[in-house]
Image (cartoon, rainbow, N blue to C red):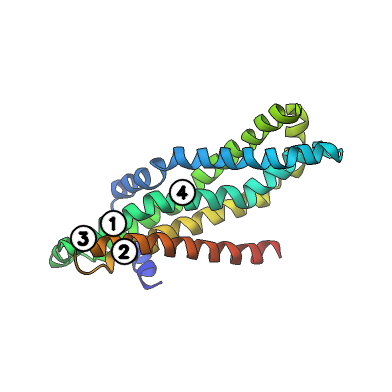
Amino acid sequence: MKNLWISILYLIKGHSRFKHAIFQAASISYDSLVISLVIAFVSAAVIAIQVSKQFLMSGAEAYIGGSIAIVMIREIAPGFVALAIGARAGTAISAEIANMQVTSQVDAIKTLKIDPVGYYFAPRILAAAITVPMVVILAEIVGIYGGLIVSHATIGLHHAKYMNSVWLWLNTRDIYISLFKGVVFGILIALVCATQGYETKGGAKDVGESTTKAAVLSTVYMLIADFIINIIFYL
C-alpha cells in the first residue's frame, strides 16, 4: 500500500510524463488484447455449448443469451482478462524492474534524486487502471457475440431471440461493476508485479524467482479482490 500512495502522490504532483503512461498502456493492455479476446470468445463458446441443449430441452432457449451475458459481464470477462494480462504483461513488468534492480539502474535513478518507486510504478499503475477496463468491455462484447454464434450453430437459435434475451437481462449496474473490477485488477497487477521486481536482490536467478512470485501473488490478490467486490455488490 505504501508504494501505491507514493505513486499516487507522484502522479498528483505531475512528475510522471504522459508519454511514459502511453507507452506502458500499449505494453500492458494493447499487447495483451488478442489473447484476452480469444479467451473471452472461447469461454463464451464453451458456456454456450454446455447450456444450449439443456435450455432447449427444458423450453428455456429464450434465456440463453441473457444467461451468457450475465456470466460474461459479471465474472468471466473481467476475471479472465485480468488473468491474461497478469500472465503476459504483469510478469514482463516484474522482470523488467527486477533486471533494473540487479543491474543497479535503480541506484542510478536514486543518485539523480528521482524517487524510483514513483518513477517506475506510477505510469504502470495509471496505464493499467485506465486500459484494463477497456479490454474488459471489448471482451464482454466478443464473449456475448461468441455465445450467439455457437448457440446458432449448435441448436439453431435465432439471433433476434438471443439478443432480445441479452437486452432484457442486461443491467448497466453489472457493466459498471465489471469496469470497476477492471480498474481494481489493473492496479493490483501493476502494483504487485512492480513491487516484486523492485524488491529483487541478487542476480539472474532471483529475477526469474521474482517473476514467478509476481504471477502467483497477482493471481491470488485478484481472486481475493474479486471475492470482496462480489460480496459488497451482490450479496
Which mark is first along the chain, 4 or 3?
A: 4
Mark 3 vs mark 1: in front: 3
Q: Are marks 3 and 4 in contact (CB under 8 Å)?
A: no
Q: Nearer the viewer, residue 6 or 91?
A: 91
In the image, residue 112 above or below residue 167:
below
Which mark is first along the chain, 2 or 4?
A: 4
Crowdedness near tag 2: few (<14), some (14–19) or many (≥20) residues, C-alpha within 10 Å: many
The x and y percentages for residue 84 are: 46, 49
What SS does tag 1 mark? helix
Query: To which residue does mark 1 refer?
Result: 95
Q: Are marks 2 and 3 in contact (CB under 8 Å)?
A: no
Query: To which residue does mark 2 refer?
Result: 210
Q: Which mark is residue 204?
A: 3
The x and y percentages for residue 216 are: 43, 62
The x and y percentages for residue 232 are: 65, 66
The residue at 45%/47% (across/down) is 131
Mark 3 vs mark 4: in front: 3
In the image, residue 190 above or below residue 20:
below
